[in-house]
Image (tube, grey):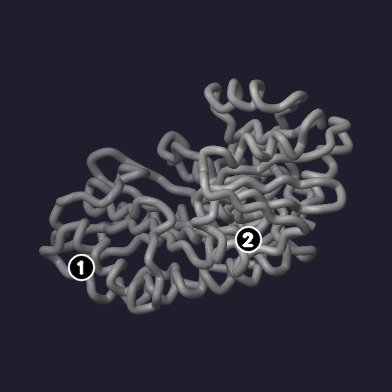
């Protein structure tokens, strides 16, 4: 299933091979978790080209029909060109820079660029299993960390607490720069943790994720430390309802823009339309943002096996903001919510 889009591209463009040489696509097509290498996809075989630094890793992680190893890493691509001499090749348009394009044109006889945006959108059963495990662990890490947050801590210290908890669970990497935005800073949708001190009665938004077996998690929870501001409590319930309505709208055959409109229209009906300033969600997988998207203009229809976030928010300068984010799996019956951390205000 993972290679079906690549094989179809070969048929569409009447090409002989598809070359992949950047992460995370290398991991996707071959399970290779390192940083440098080339994988060539043919209709009937998968061929790997790596330098000898990765010899043991490749043998442990990958299954190639043919494998070639070279002591000099600078010659790997030129060796691929020799191997595919006079053949027509597909290259990933999404990861090719102008400099690389010039290099490919000089090395390969016939080059065509293919948009791979949607290639990883439909997850396999193995991918879904990994993502469910990772999201469950991310839930656990956040749930263990929130009770440790105290007035007087810096937002950066909260990130440190999250990281300490991650290490105890053998997780080493966040999937993106963790957002911890407290008080009026919570009005910043991308309020990456700062040196601001958390104060009594602050509202706090935490948006974080981990990398588990190469796959990203992503979730947001908003809560209070101390007394709750009534206006922000009202906003919280509006965002929560928008979150739940959008999740309910998620099912195969519905476009991302339709789901976005469900959340956006509800928030607007409550008088906060001008304060919802980003898309409702995005696909999740080996990258933190990937297809399919849930935002205005996203016309692609959801399919069984898509994994997307649903994260409406309201942000009011001088007051604060609320965002609630869950990850959902599109199933034959609608949407399965994978994030389990509580959303009820305490």
Name the spot of residue 200 as percent of width and height, x first: 14, 63
Specify the farthest residue to the left. 152
Residue 206 relative to residue 106: left or right: left
Q: Position of residue 145 (x, y in %)?
A: 30, 73
Quick check: marks 2 and 1 in contact, CB under 8 Å?
A: no
Q: Is residue 24 visible?
A: no
Q: Marks 2 and 1, how far apart in space?
A: 47 Å
- Between 23 and 188, the residue placed more toward the observer is 23
Tell me what residue is drawn at x 72 percent, y 68 percent. Answer: 125
Q: Identify the element where label 1 is drawn.
A: loop
Q: Position of residue 156 (x, y in %)?
A: 21, 57
**Which residue corresponds to mark 1?**
226
On-image quarter of the N terminus: bottom right
Residue at image position (51%, 68%) is 135
Residue at image coords 14%, 63%: 153
> Which circle, 2 or 1, is nearer the viewer?
2
Give how far across and how far down residue 45 sits, in percent.
Answer: 81, 53
Q: Quadrant of residue 249?
A: bottom right
25 up-or-down from 17: above or below: below
Task: Look at 57% across and 44% down and name the residue there.
Answer: 22
Regarding mark 2 in the picture, which secondary structure is present there? loop
Work out whether 290 lies above or below 2. above
Density class for disc 1 (Cα within 10 Å; few <14, some 14-19, many ≥20) is some
Determine which quarter of the picture holds residue 226. Answer: bottom left
Binning the other alpha carbons within 10 Å of mark 2 as few (below 14), some (14 to 19) or many (20 upward) gives some
**Left or right: 224 as drawn, with respect to 42:** left
Front-lying residue, 116 or 191: 116
- The label shown at residue 31 is 2
Q: Earlier in the sequence, mark 2 or mark 1?
A: 2
The residue closer to the viewer here, 252 or 61, is: 61
Mark seen at residue 25: none
């Amino acid at each position: 299933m993972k290679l079906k889009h690549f094989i179809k591209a070969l048929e569409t463009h009447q090409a002989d091979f598809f070359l992949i040489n950047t992460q995370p696509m290398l991991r996707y097509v071959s399970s290779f978790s390192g940083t440098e290498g080339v994988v060539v996809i043919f209709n009937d075989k998968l061929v790997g080209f790596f330098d000898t630094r990765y010899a043991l890793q490749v043998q442990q992680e990958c299954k190639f029909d043919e494998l070639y190893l070279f002591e000099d890493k600078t010659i790997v691509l030129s060796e691929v060109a020799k191997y595919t001499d006079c053949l027509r090749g597909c290259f990933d348009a999404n990861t090719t820079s102008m400099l690389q394009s010039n290099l490919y044109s000089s090395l390969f006889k016939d080059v065509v660029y293919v948009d791979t945006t949607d290639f990883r959108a439909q997850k396999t059963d193995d991918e879904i299993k990994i993502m469910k495990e990772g999201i469950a662990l991310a839930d656990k890490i956040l749930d263990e960390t929130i009770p440790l947050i105290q007035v007087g801590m810096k937002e950066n210290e909260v990130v440190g607490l999250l990281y300490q908890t991650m290490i105890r669970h053998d997780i080493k990497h966040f999937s993106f720069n963790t957002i911890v935005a407290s008080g009026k800073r919570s009005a910043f949708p991308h309020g990456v943790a700062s040196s601001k001190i958390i104060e009594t009665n602050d509202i706090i938004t935490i948006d974080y994720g981990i990398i588990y077996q190469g796959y990203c998690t992503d979730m947001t929870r908003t809560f209070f430390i101390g007394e709750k501001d009534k206006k922000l409590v009202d906003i919280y319930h509006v965002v929560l309802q928008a979150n739940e309505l959008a999740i309910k709208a998620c099912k195969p055959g519905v476009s991302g823009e339709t789901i976005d409109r469900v959340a956006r229209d509800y928030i607007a009906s409550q008088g906060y339309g001008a304060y919802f300033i980003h898309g409702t969600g995005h696909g999740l997988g080996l990258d933190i943002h990937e297809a399919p998207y849930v935002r205005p203009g996203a016309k692609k229809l959801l399919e069984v096996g898509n994994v997307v976030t649903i994260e409406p928010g309201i942000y009011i300068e001088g007051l604060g903001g609320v965002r609630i984010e869950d990850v959902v799996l599109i199933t034959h019956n609608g949407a399965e919510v994978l994030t389990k951390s509580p959303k009820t205000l305490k």
